[in-house]
Amino acid sequence: MQSNKPRSSAKQRIIDAAFEPFFMHGYEAASLSHIANIVGIRKATIYTHFANKEAIFLELLQDALELECAFLQTCFATASDLSGPGDAYCHAFKERYDSAVTLRFLIRMAYASPVHLTDTIASIFNVYVDVLVKQMALALQPYDLSPEQLEIYTDAYVGVIDSLSVELLYAEALYERRLKAMLMLYQNAIGQLPKK
């Protein structure tokens, strides 16, 4: 799960082990002792690599951001001409959520962030949203849209992803139904647009 940052293998093992406890228990209840046990080290050893719990958390957040932005960009880059703008990412979203703790972590922290880190998390999550908006704007290039229309359609797409995120985080049972309904509405709207 390593990001582009050079790290020692020991530090990377701590990072890899820390994602699940922070996702499952949140910032406040994530235990450095538990993380140390997962890695097979003493809690004191964690402090040779990180100043404190917050330092680990912020590295996790940055790693999750980098990995999920890369995944998002790959989905948009590999979309076929037969699918609608943004469809590939929407269809890959649940599988990614199920298989990648980084996406689960990023979404949980964006929607249920520790109070003292809310601004920091919001600014980092907004980078993800900005990448999403840019990718969607590129996917909409074949359509004849004014700048205002482009903004509306990209904002609507971000709303679809927001809704799917909340569904996965809180009520996964209705995910497929919500995905189908939102994509139908979004695709119908895009289907009405003139191409360049």
Image (cartoon, grey):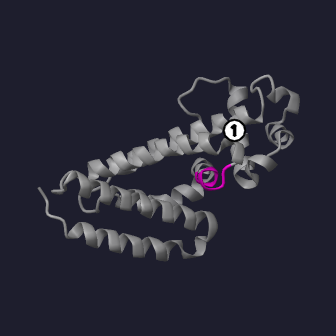
Q: Judge from the rendering whether residue 61 lies leftward or rightward of residue 179; answer left or right.
A: right
Query: Which amino acid is tagged 1?
Result: Phe
**Which quadrant of the view contains residue 193?**
bottom left
Q: Quadrant of the N terminus?
A: top right
**Residue at image point 53% right, 45% down:** 125
For the point 67% across and 42% down, which residue is it? 117
Up-down relation of residue 11 to residue 87 (above or below): above
Q: Nearer the viewer, residue 47 or 120?
A: 120
Front-most of 124 and 195?
Answer: 124
Q: Residue at x 54, y 61 (%)?
A: 165
Asked if residue 1 can be seen in this view, the reply is no
Residue 172 horizontal/vertical position (percent): 59, 70
Residue 112 falls inside the magenta stretch: yes
* Residue 16 x/y as whole percent: 68, 39
At 59% across and 51% down in the image, what residue appears? 110
Above or below: residue 195 compared with residue 13: below
| Residue 72 magenta-highlighted | no
On the question of residue 172 being in view, the answer is yes
Magenta-drawn stretch, dominant element (helix, strand or loop): helix
Point out residue 73 in the picture as x, y percentages from the top left corner. 39, 45
Where does label 1 land, which residue? 57
Which class describes the residues within 10 Å of circle 1: few (<14), some (14-19), or many (20+)?
Answer: some
Q: Which residues are magenta?
A: 107-113
